[in-house]
Image (cartoon, rainbow, N blue to C red):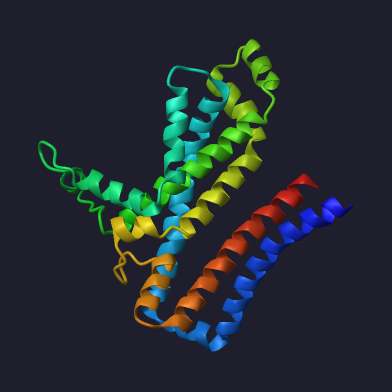
Amino acid sequence: MPFLIVMGAIGGSYVLLVVALVAADLAYTSPAHFADALAKPEIRYAIRLTLISCTISALLSVWVATPLGYLLSRFTFRGRWLIDTLIDIPVVLPPLVIGLSLLILFHLQLPGGNLEQRLQRWTGLRVTYAEPAVVLAQFAVACAFAVQTMRVTFDQIDTRAEQVALTLGCRRSQAFFLVTLPQAWRGLIAALTISWARSLGEFGPILVFAGATRMRTEVLSTTVFLELSVGQLEAAVAVSLLMVAAAMLVLGIVRLLGTKVVR
């Protein structure tokens, strides 16, 4: 019992810290501050771009993470350790380094022009310091979390049903889509949620690679920075609490949905 009390006290101290942080923000702001912040067209634009970019980034992350997580979970091949290491790089690198690397990649001089110029010639689409850069910066980091989530998900799924399907004449693709993937629905939801939440909180790569141009590449994370830079602390706190509420809402909906499905 004393051991459990000590462990509970240690864990509870962190919970109290998180509660204190949110409580401090709530005490500093007011409904009027929220109304003033939401009345700004720049912040309304940032909310809209955040919702769009985070959703696209999360969907792309799951689309990439599902086959990659399955590959790393089910197969042993030469160079697997290298792929595993490369996937973890965005997790451990400072976010600013990710943004700088993306910027260098798109402006590295190659025969026929850099990648940015080639994309503009082929598609007419500008990436750097534009909306696509926001999605790419979010995806570069969020996908790593989605891959690890899907890998753990497939690790926990028994392979016997899949092997039975193969022995009954199913192709590998059929066994994956008809047997394995339906069992991985919780992992898919978790990966989507984690990717969305991680994209919501991304700041460094977006600032370097996409910039923080108002009414163009501004998302909620950069809004906090911009409002602080002009001394609008109340608006910055209001936007911060809006991000906290959005993250809690997404996580709460997913967990509630999962509970209902299980029952």
Q: Is residue 204 left or right of residue 251?
A: left
Point out the residue furthest to the left here: 112
Q: Residue 117, percent across and down?
A: 16, 47
Q: Residue 154, percent across and down?
A: 61, 31
Residue at the spot 32% in from the left edge and 64% down from the top edge: 217
Residue at the spot 61% in from the left edge and 72% down from the top edge: 22
Residue at the spot 46% in from the left edge and 55% down from the top edge: 199
Q: Quadrant of residue 115?
A: top left
Point out the residue furthest to the bottom here: 32
The residue lying toward the viewer, choosing from 9 and 260, is 9
The residue lying toward the viewer, choosing from 83 and 158, is 83
Q: Residue 240, percent across and down?
A: 51, 71
Q: Is residue 215 left or right of residue 169?
A: left
In this rendering, the answer to whether 124 lies above or below 159 is below
Q: Quadrant of residue 89?
A: top left
Q: Is residue 116 left or right of residue 89?
A: left
Q: Residue 72, percent across and down?
A: 52, 27
In this rendering, the answer to whether 201 lies above or below 178 is below
Q: Is residue 193 left or right of residue 95?
A: right
Numbered disc total? 0
The residue lying toward the viewer, choosing from 254 and 123, is 254
